[in-house]
Image: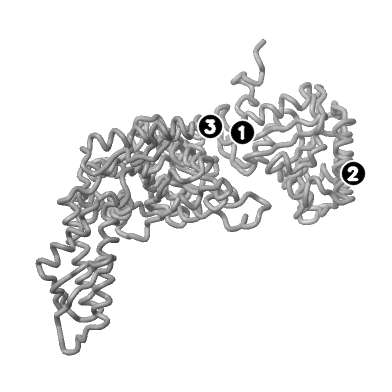
Amino acid sequence: MADPQENPENPSARLPRWGRDLTRLLPIRSQFIISGNIRDHFLTPVAGGSSDRMTPAPLRRCLWAALEQQGYRFLLIYDPVDGLRPYPHEEGVMDRAKQLFDLKFQDGVMPMSLDRLSLLMKDLARTREARCALLIDFASRLARHPDQLDAAEHRFFLAAERLAVHALPIVPRGKEVQNEDMKPRFNPVLWLLNRPQDMPSWFALDNVRVESLSIGLPDFETRALAARSYFPLFSGAEAAPSGSAETFAQNFARATEGLPLTALSDTAQLADRQGIAWDSVEDAVQCYKVGAPENPWKAPYLKKRIAGAAEFIEHRVKGQTQAVTKTVDILMRSVMGLTGAQAKSGGNRPRGVLFFAGPTGVGKTELAKTLTELVFGDARAYIRFDMSEFAEEHNSARLLGAPPGYVGFEAGGELTNAVREKPFSVVLFDEVEKAHPRILDKFLQILEDGRLTDGRGDVAWFSETILVFTSNLGIYGEDAEGNRIQNVKPGDSYKTVEARIRGAIADYFKYRLSRPEILNRIGDNIVVFNFIAPPVAERIFAGMLENVIRRVREEHALTLELALEVRERLKAWCTGELDNGGRGIGNQLESCFINPLARALFAFDSHGKTSVTVTAIEAEDQIVTLSLK
């Protein structure tokens, strides 16, 4: 037999799911605990409108629409701040409530203690003069702690529990009663809670007369229906071609995946004030999420910058042609808004995801910094997290914030706070393999949905960020005896290095962590860096040496020169071992040249001189000395 609630001709069928459940259960349930997404808007039939016209409305209005269809005459709403007030605000409703329950309203409200509210609940459940209901709003705030009640709070909830058990469905009497009203239904008590746990744990335990209704976020179809009502608020809607409203609704619904209907309303208001066109609805949603009307990703100068990206990066990251080429390809895809384009809905994912893997000191972190300057024109848009600091599971509280009730809860998380502060940024997770596996699980939500909720319940959006992970996985491995061996080494071809590192990354996520889903979401965005080749090492050495010469000129007003023999010997010392990449070259230069140079300059009489030459450099017993002239 067909469910009348699902009949499209039945007005109740157009209500949200929780509204349909409520009307269906009114004959057998005396109280309802309604929790979840209770502060959202809900599609509600328009009073006096056409049979299919719906509009987004607050919960109490949608709730009243459900009750009114069942013959209820009014709703009494109580909250701990204002007290009691009747709903709807129509002539005669307040008088009817006063007459039935001996209420004394002043300016439309009546202050009320818990004891008085308890008596009102009892009177309301028993009256047969009219169908009515009591809505207790902000019920989560009635008690300081639901399982540590004081005497008055315990007495109130106990009376409510007892009423739920002993109340009977009623058939109203009087000349206003119609045929539909002859069916027995309860005059219910409705509790609005943020979470079901905000009620005493024993309240609904084994109580078949209390029904819990959970309200979730709206689905795609609901968002699309609501979006149509906001079309006129966008610029150019009045002159849009035929069919534009439907296209707009579909795009709006896709862009707001995972958001409540109030987000659509707020987005439309922002678009109205800023004059955003209907065909740029995604920009309006982005503005709502990150709170910034300007989008650097759509700046006219960005394409010109990206066109010369390879050359720009090569000045900072030398000798990594393959890695730079793949990075620029992914960056171009991000700029064109095509990240995740193969998926039906991928609008909330990060703009780009890069997994930099390879030997230490070859430019992985430097490339992340260069991307920041290239895209956002500001190195301060770079956010770095050293994942070796998150080797313990409890350190996840630093990233996301402590849970409610723990020390530091109010501060939020380092990651979520940073992204809310800089929604357009490059977020670098350095040496990601050193983080605890449970912390890595947090990245699943970021990579898939582009959002993360901190301990306070605040959402940080990653949809306008580039995520960069760096790793040294695959450089070393273990032999059959468990000894540490070098898996790749300088001199190996790039093809060999890439294949072995990619294989090691796959093994790590699939078999060591048993989390192939993380690797699957990273996809083919793994960028493998090669070892520094000798010709590249010489260029890096020359650049670092020029930095030293410039610093001496700035600090001491001296032009530093090196004899050819000194330069060649120094180059041989610094570039002889390339396992540690450019960072190793810098360390060697500091040890073999900068330290003895500082010692020599300290003793050098530079008075009246504008230049100084390093004429000789010697190493004896691991002590380097140099001569100045």
Where, by quadrant of the figure, is residue 245 drawn? Answer: top left
- Tell me which numbered mark, 3 or 1, is placed earlier along the sequence: 1
Where, by quadrant of the figure, is residue 194 drawn? Answer: top right
Q: Nearer the viewer, residue 473 or 523?
A: 473
Q: Where is residue 434 in the image (x, y as percent from the top left)?
A: 46, 46
- Distance from Cα at disc 3 to Cα at disc 1: 27 Å
Residue depicted at 19% across the width and 62% down the height: 543
| Tally of marks | 3
Residue depicted at 15% across the width and 62% down the height: 569
Q: For the residue carrying disc 1, how many other residues have a C-alpha within 10 Å: few (<14), some (14-19), or many (20+)?
A: few
Farthest left residue in view: 564
Q: Where is residue 490 in the image (x, y as percent from the top left)?
A: 24, 44
Classify the position of the N terminus by image quarter.
Answer: top right
Q: Nearer the viewer, residue 174 or 264?
A: 264
Which three-letter amino acid code belongs to the residue tagged 3?
A: Asp
Q: Nearer the viewer, residue 554 or 253?
A: 554
Q: For the residue carrying disc 2, how many other residues have a C-alpha within 10 Å: few (<14), some (14-19), or many (20+)?
A: some
Q: For the residue carrying disc 3, how many other residues have a C-alpha within 10 Å: few (<14), some (14-19), or many (20+)?
A: some
Residue at image mark 3: 219
